[in-house]
Each structure stands twice: as C-alpha cells, then as structure tokens.
Image: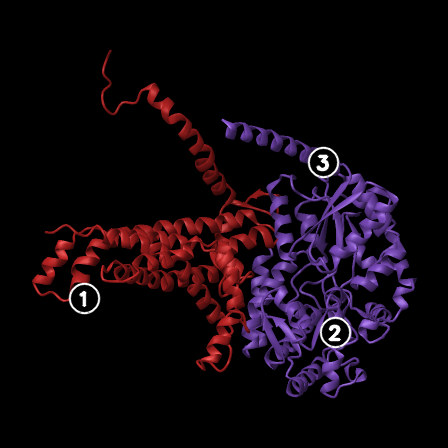
Amino acid sequence: MMAQAPGKTTLTGWLFKGPALTLLAFFMVYPILSSLWMSLQVGKGMNFSFGGFANMWRLTQDAVFQQALLNTLTLLVVQVPIMITLAMLMAVALNDPSLKGRALFRTAIFLPCVTSLVAYSVLFKSMFAFDGVVNRFLEALHIMDQPIPWLSDAFWAKTLIILAITWRWTGYNTIFFLASLQNIDPSIYEAARIDGIPRWAQFIKITLPALKPVILFTTVTSTIGTLQLFDEVNTITPLGGPSNSTLTLSLYIYQLSFKFMPSFGYAATVSYVIVVLVMILSFIQFVVARERRRP
Amino acid sequence: MKKYAFNRRSVIAAAFAGISILAVTAAQAADTVTVWCWDKEFNGATMKEAADRYAKLHPGFTINIVDFNKADLEQKLQAQLSSGTTDGLPDIVLIEDYGAQKYLQSFTKAFEPLSDTKAIDYKNFAPYKVALSTVAGKTYSLPFDSGDTGLFYRSDYLAQAGYKAEDMNNITWDKLIEIGKAVEAKTGHKMLDLDLNDDGVFRIMLQSVGGWFFTPDGKPDITSPTFKAALTQYAKLMQSGIYKPVSGWADYTGGFTSGQIAATVTGVWIVGTIKSVADQSGKWAVAPTPRIDGVKGAANASNLGGSSWYVLSSAKNKATAIDFLAQIWGKDKDFYQKILIGQGAFGTLLSAREGDAFKASDAFFGGAPVWLNFSNWLAQIPSVNFGTFTNEADSAVDAQIAGLAKGGSVDDAIKAIDAQLKQQMQ
C-alpha cells in the first residue's frame, strides 16, 4: 500500500465530503446565485424580464430605501454600543465573587433571551401604548405630565425599538463576557492589587484587553442582527412606524415582496445591500480589533 | 416487562386513533369549503350564515372559516401565490376592493373567472363592484359589500354636550372638530380615535370630493386640487387634538366598544363590531359622513373599503364553492336582509335592496331608519377608479401623517407623497 502524500485528496475523501457539499450546493450556493440573478430581473409579480442594472439605479432614486438604510444605520450606531457597554458592565458586576445571589441575577439577565421575539414585541407594544402601563407609571410618578406618544411619534418610536432590542439582547451578550471573564487568571488581579493599582485602571488595563476577542465577536454578531432587524419592528410598528421612522431594510424587503405590488427583483437587490453592508462592517471591525505587532 | 407491554398497547391505540382521525378528515374534505376572511363579527359571521343556508339545501356541506387580521391575510395570500405552491390555499378568499386589481394582474392564473360559469348574473350587482374585479372582459369575484361611510356617534354623549341629531346632520369636518372640542370639554370623552399609521379617514375625505390617488387611466394624481383640499382638511383634523391616537385595529375598535370614544367615521361594515356590545343598544346613532367645506362637488357621502369573494383556481372543491356562492350570495335576497340587520353587511346585490330590512328601523341606533339612509348616501358617493397601487399610495401618505399632525406643510407633504408614489410605481 502506498501512503498518500499529505494534502492530496483521495476518492474516499471526496465520498466523505460529498453529501455535505451536495447539501451545501443545493441549499446555500444555488439560492445565493439564484437571488443574485433575481436581483437583475424586473417586473410585476411572477412576470419577470431581464432588467440589467435597472434595480440598482432604482436604489439611487428611492427615497424610501434611503430612509430605511438611514434608520437601520441609526439603530445600529446608537443601539449596539449601548448594548455592548451594558453587557460588559453587567458581566463585570456579576463576576464579582462578593455579590450575593449571583446565580439568581445571572438567570434574570439571561431570561429575556428565552422569550420569543414576537411575544415580547406584542408585550412591549401594549405596555408602551398611548394609555399603556408605562405612560400611566410615568404620569403617576409625575415625571411626565403628558403621555409620551411612543407609537405615533418618529423619535419615540425609534427610541422604543432601541429599548426593546436592548432589553432582549443584552443578557445574551452578557453571557459571552461572563464566560470570558472567568478565564482571566485571578492572580493577575491579585498582583495588580498588591502593586496598588486602582480598580478602574485594573478594568482598563487588564479586563478590557482580555475581553477584546469577545468584544469583537459580540459587536459583529450584534451588527449583523441589527442589520437584519425585522420581527420587532414588524410587530411593534407594522407599517414602518410614524413617518417610516422604524422602517428597516428587512421590513422594506418584506413590503416590496408581500405588501406592495410584488417586486421580487428589486427586493433581492435590497437584500444584497444588507449582504454588502455586513461584509464591509465586519471587515472594518476585524481591522480595528486586529492585534498590533510590536515594532 | 409489564411496562413495555403497556407502552406497546398504547402505541397501537394511538396509531388506530391517528388513522381514524385521518379517515374523518378525508371524509370531511369531500364537501368542506375553506374560506379566508378577516372579521369574525362581520364577513366571517355573514359567511357562516350563508353556509348554514346552503347546508339546508345540500346536506353534507360544511364550511371551514379561517379568520385572520386583514393585513396578515393579504400578506399570507400574496406570499403563497408568489411561491407557486397551492397547498394550504383556501377555496374562497375575501379580497378588499383596493387590492383586487393588484392580485388579478400579478397572479393572472391564480383566480377562477366566475363569469365563465354563467351561474352568476352580474347584471344584478352594482356595476362599480363588477368593474373592480373585471380584467380583460372576465369577472373574477362574487361582489360582496359596499364601504358606504357614515358618522357613527354615541347619541348619549352628544346629548350631554348639548347636541341633537339634527345638529349632526350633513355637517362639515370643521364643524365636527368644533363639536369634538365641546364634547371633550363637557363629557371628558375624546370625539374620535385615529391610527397615525392608517390613512383610512384620509381616503374617506379624498373620495368624498371625487378625488383619488390615481387618474382614471392609472397615473398618479397627487398634485390635483382635490387631493390638496382633502390633505389640507386631514392635516387640520390631525392637528385638532379631538382624537386619541391609537395603534392597530384592536386598539382602534377598543376605543369605542369600551365606551371611551364618542364617535367614529368609517364604513357601514363597522356595525357588526358596534353591535357586538349589546348593552350599548339605543345609545348609538348614525349621521351622514362630514363633508369638506368649500370644495365644489364635495358630498356628505364616501366609501371606505368594501370587499368581494374570489375562488382560487387551485381550489379542491371548486365546483361546490362556485355553486355555493352563486346560489346564496348570487341570488338569496332573504339572506341579504338577515346579514344587513345582523352585521351591517351592505350587500351590492341590487334586487335585495327592495327587501324589508332595507326599509326597517333599527332599535340599536335609536329606532332610526339607518339602512334606508345608507341606501340614499350610497347613491351620492363620487365614483373613482381605485387602480392597482393603492397600497403604495397609502404607504406614501402614511409616511406623512405624523409630520402633518405636528403642523408640517401640506405642500411639502404633497411633494413627498408624489415623489414616493412615482418611485414605487414600477
């Protein structure tokens, strides 16, 4: 028997890879190519014809698309940093061994992630209704004398969406930070304490650098999640909210396909915008977080 | 060992139960017609009444009424028609008139041309309803209700504020705003509840002056004087503060069924919802739709919604479904009397209008001849062509509502609506 040179693939090897590759080709590669082809088609409903770059030109003319893009990026820029910071602070607090009832708090913080997206959105919608629990509460405390128009004002609707997704996803990210914090050797902190380094400096010089890979991971996944935001906005503000203020790209794709005169080609083009955005943003985040070599 | 035996027996029992359930569903499927509609107090209830009547003539006929939220139904139907598979589609589906042409033109082979069967005489129906579902000479729907509008109000609240029935007759929107302020001052009830993401009231205003989003040949018609007059009036209403802002249909109907809100301006089909609260009987009244002051041809009448039944080409029980629609919905005048009183279903089968119910007075509305009034208003509704892109136009208007409510410029809103609509219409 001849030994195979490493790196060469045998027939047996291909047979092992075959089933997985076939499935991948059918369920990943084909749909991706097919949607790319579809993004070049124009026409109403199922009556397609080749339109070349017509859909891309349409993107540049479409104020609603531009608003959806701006909304999505606004949500991203405001919400992701708030959530990651909150998650990190909560993780550090929960990691403190002197904290009583840590298990209880950890469970409580993770609990929102177990609820279904639509279920919690429906709950938020009713809580933040014009005469809902939240407005009543704020009025009872004399914080506000007028009810806040959460669902009928452009600014407040966006705020509500940010509140909702922050509530839902912060605990999820906290778990990653917690896991990572537990991998930091306690003796490093002990040494720092003996050297007289204050707590805030310990956090910046020891904790943060150790958390860097997790910060990168949570930022990338949260960015992708926010770019694809659909369930919450579709449930809380079904038509894109007052003045289209909560219309996200995903919701717009849905409207183009299932609410308006169906325009599947254009909807596919908009979905490629999300793909390109995810690629660019993830690349930037990787570059920024890259380990710098010492000179 | 014993435990194992027990398990095996229960598995076999479960298997038999499963088979018998399958057999029952198979037997049922033979004469079961599935219908999708969107309001169990209204069109769902009328469909049930129609099915009971048909089942008396055809024993074994059963109906499966699936009740959704209207937006969900439309999106589910559109998603399924786009997918190309027909599994899970119903036999009959209810489609609102605004969207009819979109479906018929986008999914050309999905619906059954009912005019081919000759079982339905379309001359008996209101011509505008037939035209709405006709494409290339073929008519696809069994016309159902009209969206004839009125001003529904709580006569008890209005009386407390010092307004009698004649004070509400043929008023303008400006007068309604004035009354609304007085009602809130004296009774603490807001006059209306409005959804800032739904321009229904705007569509009522627009059609009452004979305007629409489109010209008769389907071009955008946003820059017309009638459109501006309607939007100006709408902005005035949105800035008036006489309404409670609501979000979504349940929130909207909850406003007046709970007794919190004094009035609503909407289609006659709301009667089913209003009457669902039996202890409010005698406390309601209906007046003509407010008109827009100072516009030539402005009517105290308009239309909101209205819908028709369509049979899908893929229906498993197509023949039964068509016969059912033709026999009951196509000619049973007595049926139309029943659903008029019960649900406020203002059918468009013209010969049914001669029936007694259309002349009767209604105790729920203080003994007034409400149906005769609606018949009279129906004749005054300016006729418009809904076109194919009503959803897009709605969306363009919805995007401006919040801005207008805050005092934004009407001219800027018109420019924005025009630009968005033109962009979306391709």
For mark 1, what is the residue? A200
Looking at the rendered structure, the kind of residue marked 1 is: Trp
For mark 3, what is the residue? B24
Which quadrant: the C terminus of chain B? bottom right
Q: Are marks 1 and 2 on the same chain?
A: no
Please tell me whether mark 3 sits on a helix, a strand or a loop. helix
Disc 3 packing (10 Å; few <14; some 14–19; many ≥20)? few
Give the image location of residue B389, x and y in percent.
65, 57
Residue A59 visible in the shown view: no
Q: What chain is tagged by disc 2?
A: B
Looking at the rendered structure, the kind of residue marked 3 is: Val
Q: Residue at x 56, y 64 (%)?
A: B419
Circles 1 and 2, Cβ within 8 Å, touching? The answer is no
Find the distance from the CA under tag 2 to the CA under tag 3. Answer: 46 Å
- Report the chain shown in purple: B
Residue B363 visible in the shown view: yes
Give the image location of residue A139, x and y in percent.
48, 79
Residue B217 vertical position relative to residue B253 in the rendered view, above or below: above
Q: What chain is tagged by disc 1?
A: A
Q: Which mark is residue B152?
A: 2
Residue B87 vertical position relative to residue B334 in the rendered view, above or below: above
Looking at the rendered structure, the kind of residue marked 2 is: Phe
- Is A48 on the left or on the right of A24, as rendered? right
Find the distance from the CA under tag 1 to the CA under tag 2. Answer: 65 Å
